[in-house]
Image: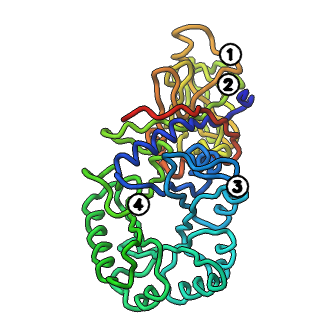
Amino acid sequence: MTPPSRCWLEVDLDAVRQNVHLLRMRSGVPLIVVVKADAYGVGAVAVSRALGVPFNDASAAHEAPWGLCVSSLDEASQLRHAGCLGRILVLSPLLPEELQRARALRVRPALHRPEEIERWAAIGSSCEPQPYHLAIDTGMSRAGVPWTALSPVQETLRATPPEGVFTHFHSADDDSDSRDQQDARFLEAFRNLGDALPPTVLRHSDNSAAILGRTGSSPGSLARPGLAVYGGVSNDSVPLRQVVHVRARVVDIREISPGETVSYGATWTATVPTRIATVAVGYADGYRRHLSNRGEVLLRGVRCPVVGRVTMDLTMIDITAVEATGEPVHCGEVVTLIGRDGDQLLSVEAVAAAGELSPYELLIGLNLRVPAVYLGSSCPFDSP
């Protein structure tokens, strides 16, 4: 596919597959890959296909994940409409009136109230039982039955046992002590439920940070990586690959004199004669305004600072250093805002840090209006 003329997002599907392979090896258990928010802006259908999840025109691959995680029924519907036949777990709580649709979409809801579990069982009573996963709150205080208040749900679980039981960490990315505390709470809850759970129940808790932060395998039966799948986090011992590369073209070039300013609010002033290139990308494309006067981009493998405020459609950069090393920059040349250019890399994590952003926020904003170009092959993984 020929790249678009303005700006585009390159998605390396081989890198996605390699990252999932590495996470599977690190966790030691099958994975439920999180593809919510359109796979963090990367493309849920494309990612699911690349991972070998079964579709109506393709059977499951050998290393396909156990299933997929989404956050809403609309996200599940997008996958089903595309022909996805794999297991789908909806992590966010559903309203009672959504359960019928969940049954029609053949998804696994996250449930924790006795009445909703009973309603789910009633919907499936006239046909084949439909699995669900019990959510347990061990400190996130967002959803799930509190780990200290399990009694009200125990009898319901005996009548309608879950396929899986899970919890969610609140600070696994920066606090292993809190992860250990939630681990202990989850294990205690699991034990307290006792024979209310079937012996085959699937237990899962680890997100990307927990998988990468442990010295051993993930506990339980499954793990749920999200951000790490898309290269949004780095780890010294797991060589995750860059997945996204945001490119845009130079659309204007000018020289400004000392004392002249750039962009809205005149927040940047030239102190020496400076060559400025205007790049066809802005915050409407997901290149965040927080990167104004902070970010840097790559042009011909040279780092160029962002100068002035990032605007809705355009971003200005200082190309003086690029032109000092060779030919003048021309309109139409490609600038890399996230990703690799030659031996230089602007990782999602590094760009997010420059703008004091969460890498999650940066990634999911990239599909605002930027077309995706998918790259990759069907070659097998290299052994880690």
Of the two numbered discs 1 and 3 in the rendering, the one whose residue sits closer to the viewer:
3
What's the residue at 42%, 72% (across, down)? Answer: 165
User: Is there CB contact under 8 Å for labels 2 and 1?
Assistant: yes
Q: Position of residue 119 (x, y in %)?
A: 59, 87
Other residues around mark 3 within 10 Å, as few (<14) / some (14–19) / many (≥20): some
Q: Nearer the viewer, residue 329 or 43?
A: 43
Residue 37 in sight = yes
Q: How is the image coloured?
A: rainbow
What amino acid type is highlighted by mark number 1?
Answer: His
Residue 170 in sight = no
Q: How many angstroms separate mark 4 from mark 3 (CA)?
A: 24 Å
Q: Is residue 132 above or below residue 179?
A: below
What's the residue at 53%, 10% (across, down)? Answer: 324
Q: Which mark is residue 222?
A: 4
Mark 1, secondary structure of its residue: loop
Other residues around mark 4 within 10 Å, as few (<14) / some (14–19) / many (≥20): many
Q: Is residue 248 above or below residue 232?
A: above
Quadrant of the rendering where the N terminus is positioned: top right
What's the residue at 65%, 52% (across, down)? Answer: 55
What amino acid type is highlighted by mark number 4?
Answer: Leu
Q: Is residue 33 above or below residue 274?
A: below
User: Is there CB contact under 8 Å for labels 4 and 3?
Assistant: no
Upstream in sequence: badge 2 or badge 4: 4
Residue, disc 1: 330
Q: Nearer the viewer, residue 192 or 274?
A: 192
Residue, disc 2: 250
Q: Position of residue 60 (x, y in %)?
A: 57, 50
Residue, disc 3: 83
What's the residue at 71%, 19% (across, down)? Answer: 331
